[in-house]
Image (spheres, rainbow, N blue to C red):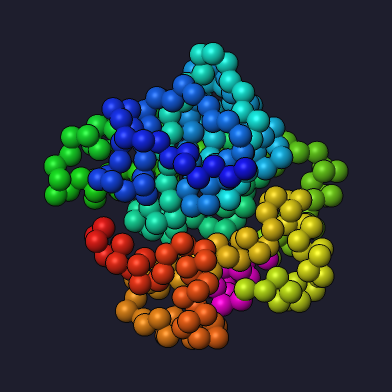
């Protein structure tokens, strides 16, 4: 069951920029969801401040305790939530559009995304946790108190800096995790990870112009079935899901940051025509390209 109404309502402990759902900061959350969660557009940073919790994340058991930081990535499935009676955490919800707003896409790579998917949680040291809490407190203060004319710019700058700190912490943790794996295990997964890395590199370089799993498999000299099997094992995602994500990213970039017409975008991204392009975008974004452009022009 997909939960589409997980985003928090407005309240004293929930902060937004205006009425937008692109960035939502929650200061204190003691409850846990029920059922299965699969958010299509939002990622979540969760920092456990008290107690314990556990849940399945794309089939892997996650056990959180105080000072643990967990990064939920969109399209991942979380289920079977359990928590101690004193569990509490802080959360930041963010969309792909927010990552564009803070220009974080230029500071991360596909290797980062793959690694964060495999190692989504890190236990913060006392100094790292104190740093995160300082950022969180300052972010909440500025979202409440900043002057209207500069509020969005200041908040986006703070979020970007905080996320860069999180990325640096997670990169270091991932190095430790990989180095601690047994040599036998490293050898057994090396080929599959290399295949995934090659797929992700080609996917990024294609910039939304290649959308068939068969085409990627041909370029990698493997069968589509084997590619799908390896992607499922290593990243727990189907290649088609990632292809759609990066196609949407390429489209959004052109809609937001270029003056290209719908026909020009369709031609640039190898769609048969503008009508097919618009249908594809609406199917995945639940709005037309024109509605998308109008929405983010108003937000500027």
Location of residue 85 by image quarter: top right
Judged from this view, the residue extending furthest toward the top is 85
Q: Residue at x 47, y 48 (%)?
A: 42
| Residue 265 placement (x, y as % from top left) | 44, 80
Describe residue 187's horizontal placement relative to residue 115 as left or right. Answer: right
Location of residue 170 by image quarter: top right
**Can residue 254 be seen in this snapshot?**
yes
- Where, quadrant-wise, is the C terminus in this rendering? bottom left
Q: Residue at x 48, y 52 (%)?
A: 41
Query: Toward the viewer: 228 or 80?
Result: 80
Indicate whether residue 206 is drawn in magenta: yes
- Where, quadrant-wise, is the N terminus in this rendering? top right
| Residue 232 placement (x, y as % from top left) | 74, 53
Q: Residue at x 70, y 70 (%)?
A: 213
Mark count: 0
**Can residue 119 be seen in this snapshot?**
no
Q: Residue at x 36, y 40 (%)?
A: 24
Indicate whether residue 24 is drawn in magenta: no
Where 129 falls versus 244 (above or below)? above
| Residue 15 placement (x, y as % from top left) | 31, 36
Describe residue 262's horizontal placement relative to residue 63 as left or right. Answer: left
Label the magenta part by its dominant secondary structure: helix
Q: Which residues are magenta?
A: 199-210
| Residue 27 placement (x, y as % from top left) | 36, 28
Where 230 falls versus 138 (above or below)? below
């Amino acid at each position: 069951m997909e939960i589409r109404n997980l985003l928090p309502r407005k309240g004293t402990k929930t902060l937004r920029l205006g009425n937008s759902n692109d960035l939502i900061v929650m200061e204190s959350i003691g409850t846990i969801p029920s059922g299965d969660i699969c958010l299509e557009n939002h990622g979540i940073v969760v920092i456990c401040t008290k107690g314990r919790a556990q849940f399945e994340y794309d089939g892997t058991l996650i056990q959180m305790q105080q000072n643990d930081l967990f990064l939920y990535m969109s399209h991942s499935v979380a289920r079977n939530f359990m928590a101690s009676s004193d569990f509490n955490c802080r959360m930041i919800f963010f969309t792909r559009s927010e990552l564009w707003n803070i220009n974080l896409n230029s500071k991360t790579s596909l290797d980062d995304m793959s690694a964060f998917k495999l190692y989504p949680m890190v236990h913060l040291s006392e100094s790292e946790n104190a740093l995160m809490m300082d950022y969180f407190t300052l972010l909440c203060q500025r979202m409440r108190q900043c002057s209207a004319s500069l509020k969005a710019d200041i908040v986006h700058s703070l979020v970007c800096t905080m996320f860069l700190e999180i990325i640096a912490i997670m990169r270091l943790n991932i190095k430790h995790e990989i180095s601690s794996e047994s040599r036998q295990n490293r050898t057994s997964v090396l080929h599959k990870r290399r295949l995934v890395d090659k797929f992700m590199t080609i996917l990024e370089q294609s910039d939304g112009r290649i959308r068939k799993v068969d085409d990627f498999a041909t370029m990698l000299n493997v069968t589509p079935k084997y590619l799908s099997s390896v992607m499922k094992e290593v990243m727990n995602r189907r290649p088609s899901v990632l292809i759609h994500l990066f196609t949407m990213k390429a489209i959004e970039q052109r809609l937001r940051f270029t003056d290209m017409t719908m026909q020009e975008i369709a031609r640039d991204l190898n769609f048969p025509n503008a009508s097919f392009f618009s249908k594809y975008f609406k199917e995945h974004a639940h709005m037309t390209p024109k509605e998308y452009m109008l929405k983010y022009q108003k937000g500027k």
